[in-house]
Image (cartoon, helix red, strand yellow):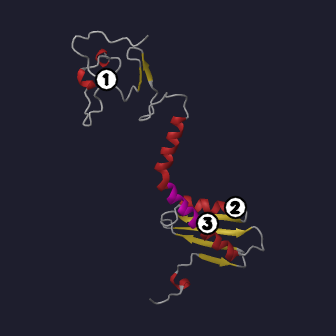
Amino acid sequence: MVKKDVKKQGINNIEFNKEGNFIIASLNPKIYPLEVIYSAVYVFLDKAYVIIDGDPDNEIFVQLKAKNSKEDMEKLGMEFNNELVNYAVYVVQAIRNQPLRKAVIERALLTNTSGNEYCTDCGCKLEYCKDCDVTYCPSCSLDHENETAHEMKEEDYIVDDPLNIAKPWTPPKEAGDEKPKNKKK
């Protein structure tokens, strides 16, 4: 691999003007979106006067003019480039973590309610049915206004039980024993 001169190849994006005590950074908006540039520039508002110019589709120019004449402009330019990378990484991580943040906030808001007032699946407010003596979600459950929803059918009780866990644990009644024995003495 042949070692190339960075300045001749145009990779260095900062031009220093020592007489005017300012720098001009030329930025590719495909690498650094405008929101990243604004965030990086915001950090430098205490140190420098800022002008942003250019075409947001092709090339953006940021001029930083030091407020303090003793400010090292080369150092200021390098710090600006570091802030650009810092905020670019932040934006990428924020996009990557957005679904997780949303889930954590939703869960925190649902568990912060008093009791079980909201459905854990859809977040709707739960309602109470006096006839069934149950709390239900109006959007996830059966229509409780319909009378047939209150009538349980035999097939509603049938459960697939391959391990025979649902079988009763009490012994069956003997023939002729109609009344259960009273164990109170």
Relative placement, left or right, of 110 versus 39 is left
Q: Position of residue 98 (x, y in %)?
A: 48, 51
N-term mark: 1 or 3: 3
Q: Mark 2 points at which residue?
A: 45
Q: Residue furthest left?
A: 175
Q: Position of residue 174 (x, y in %)?
A: 24, 16
The stretch drawn in magenta includes residue 131:
no
- Nearest to the observer: residue 117 or residue 11: 117
Q: Mark 3 points at which residue?
A: 83
N-term mark: 2 or 3: 2
N-term mark: 2 or 1: 2
Q: Which residue lies furthest to the bottom in this view?
A: 2
Who's the residue at 46% across and 90% down the image?
A: 2
User: Which image quarter: residue 23?
Assistant: bottom right
Relative placement, left or right, of 25 versus 1 is right
Tell me: residue 172, above or below residue 74.
Answer: above
Tell me: residue 46, above or below residue 158.
Answer: below
Which of pointers 2 and 1 indicates the residue nearer the eye? 1
Q: Name the residue under label 1.
A: 170
Who's the residue at 49% across and 53% down the image?
A: 97
Who's the residue at 44% across and 20% down the image?
A: 128
The CA span between labels 1 and 3 is 73 Å
* Most frequent secondary structure within the magenta stretch: helix
| Badge 2 amino acid | Leu
